Amino acid sequence: MDYELAIEETPETIPGGTGILLLHPSIGETDRIDTDFFKVDTDHFLVISTRTTAREVEQKLEHYEVDESRATILDTLSIERGYSRRSGENIYYVASPDNLDGIVEKTRAFLERHDGKLRLSVDSVTEMAYYADVDRAFEATKQILELLEEYDAVGLFHLSKEVHDQETLDRFRELFDGVVDLNEDGSVTTEF
């Protein structure tokens, strides 16, 4: 199954099972690319949020006019920070961003539960590495990429290029079928 890709400078379509690495500066405006990724050719999507709470993700989707009825959010921050959790059929929680096994399992559950064209975004792998460590974040990323292949889904994985050394960036880069490199001025260069 092919998926349309509405990100500038990328192929018009990508096959199911494709993982895309979004390299970005720390202050980069990733929301635009993330939401463009979800806007087209999608029946259901999962936002794995290790950087913001479910409420903030909902605000982002609303601001960029993404159809929230197709969204499921995995919030990894609210419990750890002691925020009240808003129960809803499309919001899931794990205790913290270093609960990588929980993140992988919730991802599998989302993919099992939904049919059609499925997308996910991991925002961000950098936070997973910060809370756990780089090796564990790398393994979790590999497992999620394997799930994409198994379920014919596609994913966008955020990684900050200012936080990690070149060796770590290259290591992650090798896992992915495509790379979108966001520059500070908002322009992108891509490699597919």
Image (spheres, grey):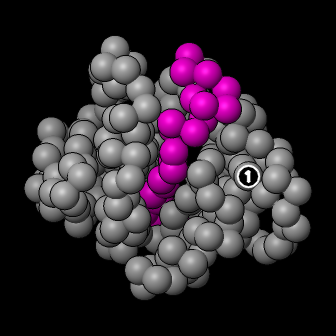
Q: Is residue 142 above or below residue 62?
A: above
Mark 1, residue position: 77
Magenta stretch, residue numbers? 115-135
Along the horizontal axis of the image, is 184 left or right of 142? left
Residue 24, image x and y in percent? 33, 45
How many residues crowd around disc 1 within 10 Å: few (fewer than 14), some, or many (20 or more)?
many
Residue visible at 11% across and 56% down in the picture: 9
Q: Amino acid at mark 1?
A: Leu
Of the pair 164 and 123, the residue shown nearer to us: 164
Residue visible at 34% across and 68% down in the picture: 32
Residue 28, image x and y in percent? 34, 54
Classify mark 1: helix, strand or loop: loop
Of the pair 9 and 79, the residue shown nearer to us: 79
| Quarter the N terminus occupies | bottom left
Specify the quadrant of the image occupied by residue 30: bottom left
Residue 94, image x and y in percent? 78, 47
Residue visible at 51% across and 31% down in the picture: 141
Residue visible at 73% across and 66% down in the picture: 91
Of the pair 91 and 41, the residue shown nearer to us: 91
Along the horizontal axis of the image, is 103 left or right of 135? right
| Quarter the C terminus occupies | top left
Q: Is residue 166 above or below residue 43?
A: above
Q: Is residue 165 above or below residue 76?
A: above
Q: Is residue 179 above or below residue 50?
A: above
Residue 48, image x and y in percent? 59, 52
